[in-house]
Image (cartoon, rainbow, N blue to C red):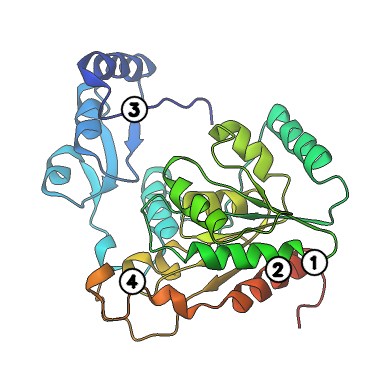
């Protein structure tokens, strides 16, 4: 990866014009929109990028993407990563590898942040566990009190050090964990790190427990074992958004979900079905992935 440029719909005309000039100056042959955004696609057209790939998910995508793919993402049935790899395969002409495992490579400064964190916050720990109770509204959430109970059980195990992470919209879930009676051995890291530093801290861990959220996938790509708690509805299920790293477990309530695609939320007679996932099951899953990662028997 040569560079990272950012774009926001709230950036305004001046920011858009600046991005168009930067894109035009690079003389890119192609662009891939993994998630279609019409305003961004228009900027690609203005920049003169001739081959524009992406999912044909909205009426405007048919006009703005001249190499679009009709992927039927809303119907589910495949993992989001596989949909994206298919788009990239159209650009490269090379089929995506089967069962590709995502990896995230940090810079030396970020890795040092992780080493320093572990040396200062968990110097004698055999296992460092991160619990992330919030999803920022992107998924159905497990009860914070259950996260607190899991944190307490893990913190009571010899050689384990437990941290609670969260940022911005995760705040209410983290505060609810504390209100539920968080074990004093558990340390809360709410809003303590920007993304770059957070990745360094996360790299120091061994296992991560959370809902269907970005930090879970980041943890897996950094080599941690991960446990994800997922709803059964297709739009939020692990089949669409589950972890793809080597050491993982997913916990899904065993219910007959009435949602054909999207979660019905409070309108569902089974809401909140994630309450069917027990604390002991989560603890057992965390211990299992730690054992697998360490090469230990999990039975």
Q: Which residue is mark 3?
A: 7
Relative vertical location of residue 247 with respect to residue 38 in this rendering, above or below: below
- Coordinates of residue 37 in the picture (x, y in percent): 24, 39
Q: In the rendered view of the protein, which quadrant contains the C terminus?
A: bottom right
Question: Which label is found at residue 157?
Answer: 1
User: Separation of disc 2 and disc 1 at Cα?
Assistant: 7 Å
Q: Quadrant of residue 117?
A: top right
- Coordinates of residue 148 in the picture (x, y in percent): 59, 62
User: Separation of disc 3 and disc 4 at Cα?
Assistant: 30 Å
Whichever of callouts 3 and 4 sits on the residue coming sooner in the sequence is 3
Q: Are marks 3 and 4 in contact (CB under 8 Å)?
A: no
Task: Name which residue lies at 65% across and 62% down.
Answer: 151
Task: Name which residue lies at 32% across and 41% down.
Answer: 33
Q: Secondary structure at mark 2?
A: helix
- Coordinates of residue 253 in the picture (x, y in percent): 45, 79
Q: Are marks 2 and 3 in contact (CB under 8 Å)?
A: no
Relative vertical location of residue 224 with respect to residue 200 in this rendering, above or below: below
Q: Which residue is mark 4?
A: 234
- Nearer mark to the viewer, of 1 and 3: 1
Q: Is residue 29 left or right of residue 149?
A: left
User: Separation of disc 1 and disc 3 at Cα?
Assistant: 45 Å
- Nearer mark to the viewer, of 2 and 4: 2
User: Separation of disc 1 and disc 4 at Cα?
Assistant: 36 Å
Relative vertical location of residue 120 with respect to residue 2 in this rendering, above or below: below
Q: In the rendered view of the protein, which quadrant contains the N terminus?
A: top right
Q: Which residue is mark 2?
A: 153
């Amino acid at each position: 990866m040569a560079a990272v440029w950012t774009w926001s719909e709230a950036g305004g005309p001046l920011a858009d014009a600046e991005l168009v000039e930067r894109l035009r100056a690079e003389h890119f042959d192609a662009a891939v929109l993994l998630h279609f955004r019409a305003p961004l696609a228009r900027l690609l057209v203005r920049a003169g990028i001739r081959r524009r790939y992406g999912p044909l998910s909205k009426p405007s995508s048919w006009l703005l993407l001249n190499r679009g793919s009709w992927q039927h993402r809303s119907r589910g049935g495949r993992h989001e990563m596989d949909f994206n790899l298919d788009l990239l395969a159209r650009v490269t002409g090379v089929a995506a590898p089967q069962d590709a495992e995502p990896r995230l490579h940090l810079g030396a400064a970020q890795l040092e942040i992780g080493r320093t964190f572990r040396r200062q916050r968990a110097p004698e720990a055999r296992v460092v566990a991160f619990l992330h109770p919030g999803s920022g509204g992107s998924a159905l959430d497990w009860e914070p009190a259950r996260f607190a109970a899991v944190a307490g059980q893990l913190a009571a195990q010899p050689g384990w050090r437990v941290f609670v992470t969260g940022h911005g919209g995760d705040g209410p879930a983290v505060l609810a964990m504390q209100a539920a009676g968080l074990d004093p051995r558990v340390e809360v890291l709410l809003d303590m790190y920007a993304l770059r530093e957070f990745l360094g801290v996360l790299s120091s861990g061994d296992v991560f427990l959370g809902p269907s959220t970005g930090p879970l996938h980041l943890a897996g790509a950094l080599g941690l074992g991960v446990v994800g708690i997922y709803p059964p509805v297709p739009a939020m299920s692990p089949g669409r958004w589950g972890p793809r790293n080597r050491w993982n477990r997913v916990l899904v309530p065993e219910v007959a979900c009435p949602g054909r695609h999207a979660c019905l939320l409070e309108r569902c007679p089974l809401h909140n079905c994630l309450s069917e996932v027990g604390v002991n099951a989560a603890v057992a899953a965390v211990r299992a992935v730690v054992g697998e990662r360490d090469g230990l028997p999990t039975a």
